[in-house]
Image (tube, rainbow, N blue to C red):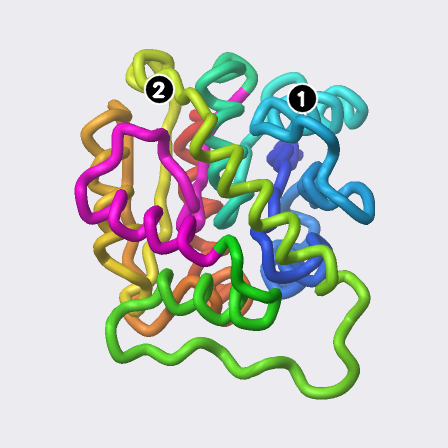
Amino acid sequence: MATRPAVVLLPGIVLPAESAYAALLQVLGERVDAVVKELEVYAGDEPPPGYGLGFEVDGVLAVADAHGFGRFHLVGYSAGGAAALAFAAVHGDRLLSLALLEAAWAGNDRTPQEEWVMQGFRALAPFPPDEFMTGFQRLQLAPGVDPPPPPEGPVPAWMAKRPAGIRAILDAFDRGDLDAGSLRAFARPAYFALGGRSNPDYFGRMAERLAATFSDFTIETFPERHHFDPPHRVEPERLANSLLRLWQRAEQ
């Protein structure tokens, strides 16, 4: 019997890890040995003092070691994608493949269009939480695409962590140092899922930069998806098939 792929999945910033990947994991079923890991920025009620992407890199390493994953596939969405990229730059030898579901950051060598969006994120800093979150969402969507409506019912307790966590993540991005040379030397397959209704001047430009960096890089566009309506939740069958092909190719 073939060994099941060992996979670590990192969420973004909208939902807790188990909820974020529930649909994808249901489709993948017993075909993978998957571990869903919450981001370190949300480990407590407030972001850890001195938080930076190094916290996330160390957290992934600790989880992989605890589960006996010598080499494994890493999947990251949004801020989890940024953490996955940071991990690949430092511990690329531990990875069999890298899958980025609209990574929220790809180093600070940004195009002017990406930098304009980052300036918009920074300008939101003094806003109250509700306005901050609405502006944060809108900047990541294509023109004419509305942010998703607030969930019905009582506000979940975990939502209270999100504004402070996002601010900490954005600050970590500005202070981050992604070693592009290490990514150019990454000899494993890498994949980027891009939403057709996400902001093309942010995620699209980022995907193009990464395609010019990695030696083996695939961009797959999901035309009807956007950053807050992502394929791992809405089109899990299609994404699962893409990931299984990636993992199979990486292990040949």
Q: Does any portion of residue 34 appear in the rendered image?
A: no
Image-based side of 96 in relation to 48, left or right: left
Give whichever of 150, 80 is nearer the camera: 150
Image x and y of residue 226, in percent: 38, 67
User: Eyeballing the image, is 12 above or below 85?
Assistant: below
N-terminal label among 1 and 2: 1
Mark 2, other Cα within 10 Å: few <14 / some 14–19 / many ≥20: many
**Where, quadrant-wise, is the C terminus in this rendering?**
top left
**What kind of residue is marked 2?**
Leu
Please provide the residue range marked out in magenta.
95-124
Residue ID at (43%, 28%) = 250
Image-based side of 44 in relation to 140, left or right: right
CA distance for labels 1 and 2 = 18 Å
Label 1 sits on a secondary structure element that is: helix
Residue ID at (40%, 39%) = 105
- Mark 1 highlights which residue? 58
Q: Does any portion of residue 173 appear in the rendered image?
A: yes
Give whichever of 143, 86 is nearer the camera: 143
**Tally of numbered discs:** 2
Give whichever of 163, 7 is nearer the camera: 163
Residue ID at (32%, 18%) = 180
User: Eyeballing the image, is 190 above or below 163?
Assistant: above
- Mark 2 highlights which residue? 183
**What kind of residue is marked 1?**
Asp
- Asked if residue 121 lies in the magenta stretch, the reply is yes
